[in-house]
Image (tube, grey):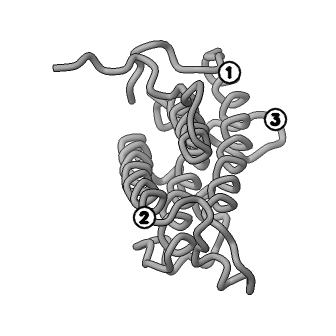
C-alpha cells in the first residue's frame, strides 16, 4: 500500500490552470479545517473583541458555501436542507452554538467531500471555462473558473478569521497543518 501524502494541502508546484486553482482551494480547505480542529463546544463558540464571529459559526457557514456553490451555483441541483429553504443568511453563524462539535465537524467534512467529487467531475467534463448555473441568477455568463475564484476568496477571508480566533482561544498559530495532520 502506498504511503499517504504527509502534506496533501500543498498545491502542485507546476500544473495546469485547473490543477493550480483546485490545489489553492484545497489548501484553504485543509488550512481552515486544521484551524478549526479539536475544539470543544465552548471554544467553538468563543468570540474575540467586538466581533461575533466564532469558529463554529465559520464551520457551519463554510458548510453552507460548499453545499450551495457546488450544487445550485454549479449546475442548478438541489443543495439539500437546511440550505435549500434558508432565509436568514446569519443563521449558520448564529445557530452553530446549538450544534455539537461532532456535528459541526462531520457536516463540514461531508460537505467538502461531496463538493470535491462534484467539482472534479465538472472540471473533467467541461473544464474551467464552462458556464455555470450561477450566471442565470446574475443574468450573464459565469464560468466555473470565476465560481472557484469566489470560493477561494471566501475561504481566504474566513481562514484569516479562524487564524485570529484560534490564536486567541489556545495560542495555535501557523500557516499550514503539521506534516501528517488529518481531521
Sequence-wise first label, 1 or 2: 2
Residue 2 appears at what percent x and percent y?
22, 19
Residue 23 appears at what percent x and percent y?
55, 37
Tell me if I can see residue 126 in this picture.
yes
Q: Nearer the viewer, residue 180 or 88?
A: 180
Vertical side of 5 occupied by 43: above or below: below
Residue 117 appears at what percent x and percent y?
37, 54
| Residue under the image location 58 percent in, 55 percent down | 61
User: With 50 as the anchor, is 181 left or right in this view?
Assistant: left
Residue 158 appears at what percent x and percent y?
69, 43
Alpha carbon separation for disc pair 1 and 2: 41 Å
Q: Nearer the viewer, residue 158 or 82?
A: 158
Which mark, residue 49? 3
- Mark 3 secondary-structure assignment: loop
Q: Are marks 1 and 2 in contact (CB under 8 Å)?
A: no
Name the residue tied to disc 1.
167
Name the residue tied to disc 2.
125
- Mark 1 secondary-structure assignment: helix
| Residue under the image location 60 percent in, 39 percent down | 20
Q: Are marks 3 and 1 in contact (CB under 8 Å)?
A: no
Occupied quadrant, residue 16:
top right
Occupied quadrant, residue 140:
bottom right
User: With 183 as the anchor, is 59 left or right in this view?
Assistant: right
Alpha carbon separation for disc pair 3 and 1: 13 Å
Crowd tier of the residue under label 3, counting other residues whose Cα lies within 10 Å: few below 14, some 14–19, many 20 or above: few
Amino acid at each position: 500500500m502506498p504511503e499517504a501524502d504527509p502534506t496533501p494541502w500543498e498545491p502542485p508546484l507546476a500544473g495546469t490552470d485547473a490543477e493550480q486553482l483546485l490545489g489553492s482551494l484545497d489548501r484553504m480547505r485543509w488550512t481552515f479545517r486544521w484551524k478549526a480542529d479539536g475544539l470543544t463546544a465552548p471554544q467553538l463558540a468563543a468570540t474575540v473583541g467586538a466581533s461575533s464571529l466564532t469558529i463554529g459559526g465559520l464551520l457551519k457557514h463554510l458548510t453552507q458555501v460548499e453545499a450551495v456553490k457546488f450544487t445550485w451555483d454549479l449546475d442548478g441541483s438541489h443543495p439539500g436542507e437546511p440550505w435549500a429553504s434558508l432565509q436568514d443568511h446569519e443563521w449558520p453563524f448564529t445557530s452553530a452554538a446549538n450544534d455539537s462539535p461532532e456535528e459541526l465537524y462531520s457536516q463540514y467534512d461531508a460537505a467538502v467531500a461531496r463538493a470535491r467529487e462534484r467539482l472534479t467531475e465538472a472540471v473533467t467534463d467541461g473544464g474551467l471555462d464552462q458556464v455555470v448555473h450561477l450566471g442565470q441568477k446574475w443574468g450573464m455568463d459565469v464560468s466555473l473558473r470565476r465560481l472557484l475564484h469566489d470560493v477561494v476568496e471566501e475561504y481566504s477571508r474566513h481562514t484569516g478569521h479562524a487564524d485570529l480566533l484560534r490564536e486567541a482561544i489556545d495560542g495555535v498559530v501557523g500557516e499550514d497543518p503539521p506534516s501528517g495532520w488529518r481531521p
